Amino acid sequence: MNKKTIATIKAYLFLAPFLLVFSTMVIYPIALGAKLSLYGQRGARMWYIGFQNFATIFQDSKFWESFRIPLFLLTVQVPLMLFIAALIAFLYEKLEKHGGGFFRFIYYLPYTIPGIVTGIIWSYIFSDSMSPFRPVIDLLGYSGTKILTRQHLPSILLVIILWAFTGYTAFVIYSSLIAIPKAFSEQAQLDGATFWQIAFRIKMPLLRGVFISLFIFNA
């Protein structure tokens, strides 16, 4: 055997443990799930029904309803969060000499709060009886309106996710922002460009890869 063949065999031997575990823990369960989806079951008794399970679920309105919130978050929350986070990141840069570190700490803080604590905080804020915003809601003419309802769930999730993750996202964008060579900004300033023109017309396109990664991560 030549060296190339030996190297190939060694590579597969190194991959063998991973392939074994991956096949056992991932591929086999997926294949088994696909097989079981073609059967009906009652107790220990199983019988083949073909694609009847799929036909049933596709005719169920609750199945399609389950896509409503994820699609809302994907099409509204993620782009909105990236836009707000970009603005905050540029403000970090603009205020770097005027307490920028303090603002980074304040915006990043919600991301460090455990999920259970976050749930308690927002359940209090959106409570029908204890919400600090209840007087404002009543003043606007919505007295007696319940906040925590299925109808308001997408908007509530939007607010909570923006509060919890926008600061972290802004921090990631800012970390990439400060890595951009200052020569781009200095040259644009000499040409009379303002801070925000530099931000949106020069730096934003340079951060395209970061935004794509963050979109995939948050989606």
Image (cartoon, rainbow, N blue to C red):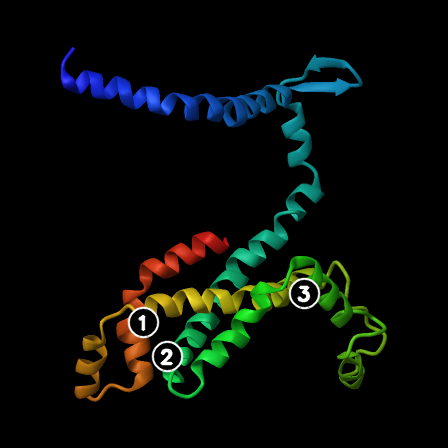
Q: Is residue 135 above or below residue 158?
A: below
- Circles 2 and 3, Cβ within 8 Å, touching? The answer is no
x and y, in percent, of residue 21 in the image:
48, 24
Q: Sequence order check: which comes first, mark 1 or mark 2?
A: 2
Report the residue marked by disc 3.
156
Report the residue marked by disc 1.
178
Quarter of the N terminus within the rendering: top left
- Label 3 secondary element: helix
- Label 2 secondary element: helix
Type of residue at label 1?
Ile
x and y, in percent, of residue 144 in the image:
85, 74
How many neighbours does mark 3 have within 10 angstroms: few (below 14), some (14-19), or many (20 or more)?
Answer: some
Q: Sequence order check: which comes first, mark 2 or mark 3?
A: 2
Q: Is residue 131 above or below residue 6?
A: below
- Circles 1 and 3, Cβ within 8 Å, touching? The answer is no
Residue 11, image quadrant: top left
Residue 43, image quadrant: top right
How far apart marks 2 and 3 lie (CA) works out to 30 Å
Q: Is residue 24 above or below residue 197?
A: above
Q: Nearer the viewer, mark 1 or mark 3?
A: 1
Residue at the far left: name it: 2
